[in-house]
């Protein structure tokens, strides 16, 4: 089951990388070098989902964008390579566990905030259709990586046959 999930994670990160650069991180591009399609895509997203994080982001959301730029981008590049080169090593499992916790918590924060916005059920449902699967994916990855790492740590035996922690 582990390798099948690794392939799912690999596909996720391969898709996630361009989305970060083309949608999420566009505020970091100077207008002079930002391609028109990025502005159009972001406008479509804002019009379709009315996502306030992309219209009038609170200060903490800007911090989340910096985390995406400084943590998610390098981690995604690392994860693609690690997941491509089977079997997944314990160090990569640890990185993916940390990623899943960070991604899950930040997305859950966004969901809590978005649910407080004045929206009708259809609009809320459309927006939650983007955010909730991302949290579910983070939880799946977190539980999977925790289980795998528990096996690695639990398998460490030393001394007189006693397990080390």
Image: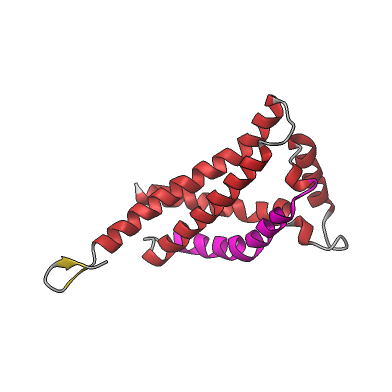
Q: Residue at x 72, y 57 (%)?
A: 62
Whether residue 127 is visible, yes or no, is yes
Question: In this figure, which colouring scheme has been used for the structure?
Answer: secondary structure
Judge from the rendering whether residue 97 lies leftward or rightward of residue 67; answer left or right.
left
Q: Position of residue 74 (x, y in %)?
A: 58, 66
Q: Position of residue 78 (x, y in %)?
A: 52, 65
* Residue pictured at 63% horizontal, 61% vertical: 67
x and y percentages locating residue 24 in the rendered image? 70, 53
Q: Is residue 120 above or below residue 102?
A: above
Q: Which residue is pictured at 50% across the width and 48% down the height?
A: 138
Locate residue 123: give its quadrant.
top right
Q: Is residue 78 magenta?
A: yes
* Residue, far top: 121
What residue is shown at x 67% (from left), y 55% (from top)? 20
Pick the residue in front: 155 or 115: 115
- Residue range corresponding to the magenta coloring: 55-84
């Amino acid at each position: 089951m582990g390798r099948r999930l690794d392939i799912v994670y690999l596909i996720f990160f391969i898709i996630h990388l361009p989305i970060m650069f083309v949608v999420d991180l566009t505020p970091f591009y100077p207008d002079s070098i930002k391609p028109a399609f990025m502005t159009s895509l972001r406008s479509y997203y804002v019009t379709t989902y009315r996502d306030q994080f992309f219209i009038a982001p609170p200060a903490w959301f800007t911090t989340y964008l910096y985390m995406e730029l400084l943590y998610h981008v390098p981690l995604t590049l690392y994860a693609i390579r690690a997941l491509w080169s089977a079997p997944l090593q314990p160090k990569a499992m640890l990185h993916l566990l940390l990623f899943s916790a960070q991604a899950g918590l930040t997305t859950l924060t966004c969901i809590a905030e978005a649910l407080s916005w004045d929206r009708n059920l259809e609009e809320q449902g459309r927006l939650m259709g983007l955010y909730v699967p991302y949290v579910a994916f983070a939880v799946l990855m977190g539980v999977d990586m925790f289980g795998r790492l528990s096996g690695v740590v639990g398998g460490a035996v030393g001394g007189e046959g006693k397990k080390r922690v």
